[in-house]
Amino acid sequence: MSVAKREVVHAINTGAHSSPSSRFYPLSSPKEKAMYELLQDLLKAGLISKTKSEYAPPAVLTPKPDGSWRLVIDLSQNHMNLLKVSNEIKPRSFMEVIGEM
């Protein structure tokens, strides 16, 4: 598996909307320890990086069949798709292109 080694800068225009807030789920002490260890492993492997963002959906741990933990990001309350300002450029229709020939 290869991992991109470049920085990505990304911005989403949300207009005048404030950032959506999501409550984090409480974790038991063993799950909190497992979450910390899993995140440290992912950081060391370069698969995730530390960031500061107003948009942070809650993360949960679910058990895998082998007894280890799977990190899952809960996007069920993610309202980003409703907040974004549409600024996409619509392509011209086929008939418009043909009409210019």
Image (tube, grey):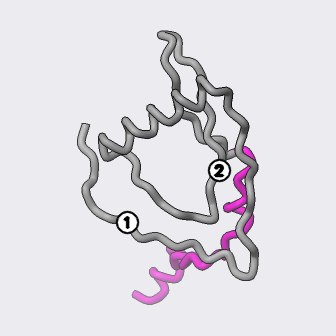
Residue visible at 45% across and 33% down in the picture: 38
In this picture, which residue range is highlighted in magenta? 76-101
Q: What element carries label 2?
A: loop
Asked if residue 81 is among those painted magenta in the image, a careful observer would answer yes
Which residue in the protein does label 2 denote? 57
| Label 1 packing within 10 angstroms: few (<14), some (14-19), many (20+) | few
Q: What is the CA distance from the residue labelled 1 to the residue labelled 2?
A: 19 Å
Instruction: Decide: is 76 above or below 12.
Output: above
Nearer to us in this view, 60 or 35: 35
Nearer to us in this view, 5 or 35: 35
Q: Which residue lies furthest to the front in this view?
A: 29
- The spot of residue 2 in percent (x, y) is 24, 42
Disc 2 residue type (three-letter): Pro
Disc 1 residue type (three-letter): Val
- The spot of residue 10 in percent (x, y) is 46, 70
Quarter of the image with the C terminus is: bottom left
- The spot of residue 82 in percent (x, y) is 74, 64
Instruction: Decide: is 48 above or below 14.
Output: above
Which residue in the protein does label 1 denote? 8
Quarter of the image with the N terminus is: top left
- The spot of residue 12 in percent (x, y) is 57, 72
Nearer to us in this view, 41 or 6: 41
Residue visible at 65% across and 45% down in the picture: 58
